[in-house]
Image (spheres, rainbow, N blue to C red):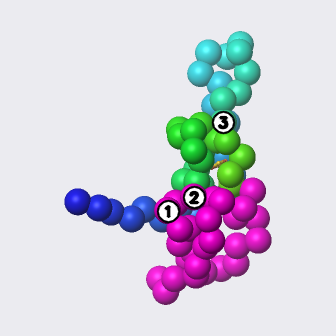
Amino acid sequence: MAREVTHEEREPTAIDPDDHDGDIYICQCGLSDDKPFCDGAHTVTADEEDVVYKYENDDSDQPRQPVDG
Ligand code: FES
């Protein structure tokens, strides 16, 4: 079974689970190769416009195509 998930966020969310080791950044864009952690891949979404994109193989290094919503 397969499913597609749409991510609207373009930045990670920061959490500080133990209040003394600093923030951990959690991926919200869906493109990180190190999920659940942000690896900086979200930077490719900076120029996205108000349409839905499909990233080939869910990989930020691959081409993206706009898709009809
Ligand atoms: S928020 Fe997904 S890689 Fe940074």
- Contact (CB < 8 A) between labels 2 and 1? yes
Dot 3 lies on which element? strand
Determine which of the numbered discs, if any, sits on residue 25 in the image. Answer: 3
- Please state the horizontal and vertical placement of residue 22, each as a whole percent of the image: 73, 21
Which disc is residue 57 wearing? 1
Can residue 23 be found in the magenta stretch?
no
Residue 26 visible in the shown view: no
Q: Amino acid at mark 3?
A: Tyr
Q: Are marks 1 and 3 in contact (CB under 8 Å)?
A: no
Task: Name the residue at 58% across, 81% down.
Answer: 66
- Measured as percent of width and height from the top left, residue 50 is found at 65, 79
Q: CA distance from mark 1 to mark 3?
A: 23 Å
Element carrying mark 1: helix
- Of circles 1 and 3, the one toward us is 1
Which amino acid type corresponds to the residue marked 2 in the rendered image? Answer: Asp
Q: Who comes first in sequence, dot 1 or dot 3?
A: 3
Q: Which residue is mark 2?
A: 59
